[in-house]
Amino acid sequence: MTANGTFEVKMKPQTDETGDPTIGRLSLDKQFHGDLEATSKGQMLAVQGDVKGSAGYVAIERVIGTLAGRTGTFALQHTGTMNRGVPKQSVTVVPDSGTGELAGLSGKMTIKIAEGKHSYEFDYELAQ
């Protein structure tokens, strides 16, 4: 099954005096619309390379809401790189993280950014 829609994200830098100052830490606050009506909160770690357009990040977020009429929660794990301006990203449902009517959820999400607007395509399965 495939879910589509848009989302807004707010990212806020977090201070962490104990870590490496070249690694950015941000909080994530999202609002999903469309086939996935949900909110999420998460954390991101990011680092920039020495060459402009090169960077990497990892993130985890907990999604709470309704997917195709089913209510529950699940977690998404992100990994991404930008190699001299060329992006590569993976956003995957954490195995066995689904709760409620979303128990048994698996899948991958593709995030698209066009003209400053965020959208998603979420290919998923629900174990019966």
Image (tube, helix red, strand yellow):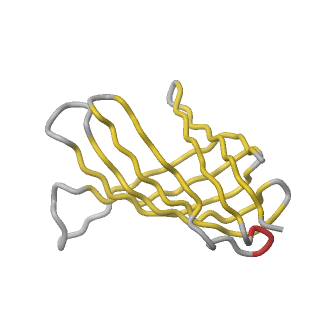
The image shows a total of numbered marks equal to 0
Q: Position of residue 126 (x, y in %)?
A: 77, 62
Question: Which quadrant of the view contains residue 64?
Answer: bottom right
Classify 40 as above or below 90. below
Residue at 71% x, 46% y: name it: 33
Indicate left or right for 36 with 89 as reference. right
Residue at 74% x, 72% y: name it: 103
Question: As drawn, which residue projects farthest toward the top?
Answer: 115
Classify 54 as above or below 80. above
Indicate left or right for 63 with 28 as reference. right
Q: Position of residue 44 (x, y in %)?
A: 38, 58
Residue at 75% x, 67% y: name it: 102
Question: Which quadrant of the view contains residue 43?
Answer: bottom left
- Position of the C terminus, as image quadrant, is bottom right
Residue at 74% x, 44% y: name it: 2
Indicate left or right for 57 with 116 as reference. left
Question: Which quadrant of the view contains residue 51?
Answer: top left
